[in-house]
Image (cartoon, grey):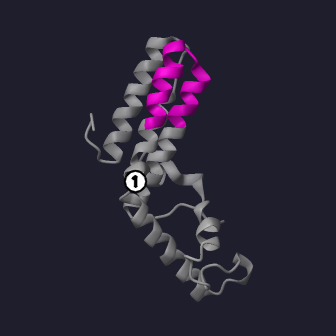
Amino acid sequence: MRPPWFALARARGSILPSVATSSDETSSDEASSDRTFCADMAGRLAGLPGVRADGQSTLGYARAAHARSGQLADTAGAIATAACQAAHSVLAARGQWVTNEKNLLERAGLRGIDGVLAGLTAEPGHLLTAVAAADTLLRAAVQEPAGS
């Protein structure tokens, strides 16, 4: 499975023909080229401020729109989404592009988010505390100083 941006890059002609072949036609040389391309793109994306900011924006929205209102499922979902966004950022900084998210949080060292989500209640104070804990954990993972 190719990353979501792959089809757009292919349509714009910014992918080498050997990389753009379908997976059932891919030789080992082409697969190697595909992995190299993905690693290169991951490295380029890691430097974009938006890649790191997505998780922070998601948490900010969770804090303002969901946690303060005691919306448990919405807050928990936003925290999980932010963790996955941060995990992609961590792995992109390592030059790794994830096309199978089964072990995304483990690979990025963010399995600790489970502890933040465990035992959540719909009490707004509890949800705000969870969002703050997630923020601390995710900022540390992407090595972004608090307040930036």
Q: Which residues are magenta?
A: 57-80
Tell me what residue is drawn at x 29 percent, y 47 percent. Answer: 143
Where residue 136 appears, x then y in whole percent? 34, 34
Residue 77, x across and y down, in percent? 58, 32
Residue occupying the point 60% across, 59% down: 100
Quadrant that contains the N terminus: bottom right
Majority secondary structure in the magenta region: helix
Q: Is residue 95 above or below residue 105?
A: below
User: Residue most toward the right?
Assistant: 24
**Percent x, y of residue 47:** 35, 59
Asked if residue 29 shows in the view, the reply is yes
Q: Is residue 93 above or below residue 61?
A: below
Q: Nearer the viewer, residue 103 or 94?
A: 94
Membership of 108 in magenta stretch: no
Residue at screen point 47% across, 21% down: 64
- Give the farthest residue toward the front: 12
| Mark 1 surroundings: few (<14), some (14-19) or many (≥20) residues within 10 A | many
Residue in the foreground of this view, choosing between 74 and 137: 74
Residue 28 falls in image quadrant = bottom right
**Quarter of image, res 133:** top left
Question: What amino acid does circle 1 point to?
Answer: Val
Vertical order, 36 against 91 (above or below): below
Q: Position of residue 126 (x, y in %)?
A: 45, 15
Q: Mark 1 falls on what kind of element?
A: helix
Q: According to the image, label 1 marks what residue? A: 90
